[in-house]
Image (tube, rainbow, N blue to C red):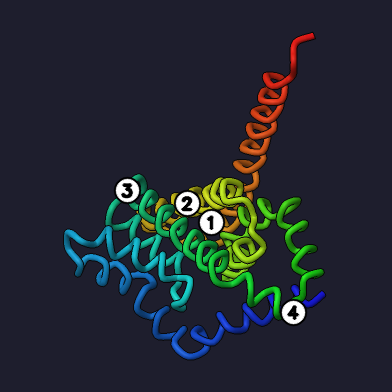
Amino acid sequence: MRLIWLSVGLAILLLIPFAIWGDAFTAWFTGDAAIVWLRSWGALGWAAVLALLSADLVLPLPATGVMSAAGFVYGTAIGGALSALGSFLSGILAYGLCRRFGRRAVRWIAGADDVARGEALFRARGAWLVALSRCLPLLPEVIACLAGATRMPFRIFALSLACGCVPIGFIYAAIGAAGQDRPALALALSVAVPAVLWALVQLWLLRRKRVSAESDRPPA
């Protein structure tokens, strides 16, 4: 399936900046260095958080380090909201760019049949892929790009993206606010909570669909 090879190629492409500048970005935006950098922006620190996390699509940023720094500087509530929003914007940017400009390239590389299979996959399982991928490196960008290129419905993409971004943003901001380093706990929660949230959202969507179908049914 050429779509799989396209995914691998996209992941390798995203790995190139990490291979070249990854160590430098990790040193700049992890731990105390990230806190000092964020505070240097003064009143515009919130905008710096959003800009950095949005740019995670193309820059080799340690997103969790930025989120933790946001939590340390702004507290769990504000730092978590900024982290979640920045991560959400990054996903929307990847989806939008690939939906607008990437579909033709994907069809040319993967072929119409593989694109059709990819569309079926993202209709059936795309929401779970989007929600659960946000806690992993590189995979969120690849999944968001493929979701856009295969024209995954925007509403489903946005809801599942929020289910992944919100808990991760608040979890790492809370760790930063507490001045603690618990990567294993953060990883476990950032996988479990999005899964629970998307399951609840899916139940809500099914309920709405059922209610809508019943309201459209002609009276006996």
Residue 114 appears left or right of 96: right
Q: Which mark is residue 78?
A: 3
Q: Marks 1 and 4, how far apart in space?
A: 31 Å
Q: Specify the amino acid type for callout 3.
A: Ile
Classify mark 3: residues with Cα within 10 Å, few (<14), some (14-19) or many (20+).
Answer: some
Answer yes or no: do the residues labelled 1 and 3 have beta carbons within 8 Å?
Answer: no
For badge 1, the amino acid type reads Ala
State the image coordinates of residue 159 (x, y, percent, origin top left).
Answer: 56, 46
Instruction: Find numbered disc 2 in the image and state the secondary structure of the residue it sits on.
Output: helix
Q: What element carries label 4?
A: helix
Q: Name the residue under label 1.
A: 186
Q: In this view, does 72 lie above or below 37?
A: above
Residue bearing the label numbered 4: 5
Q: Which of 140 and 214 is in front in this view?
A: 214
Which numbered disc, 1 or 3, marks the residue that appears first in the sequence?
Answer: 3
Residue 100 is situated, as x and y percent measured from the top left of the image, at 54, 66
> What residue is rendered at 61% in x and 47% in y?
156
Q: Which amino acid does label 4 sit on?
A: Trp
* Rendered view: 211 above or below 106: above
Q: Where is residue 48 in the image (x, y as percent from the top left)?
A: 29, 65
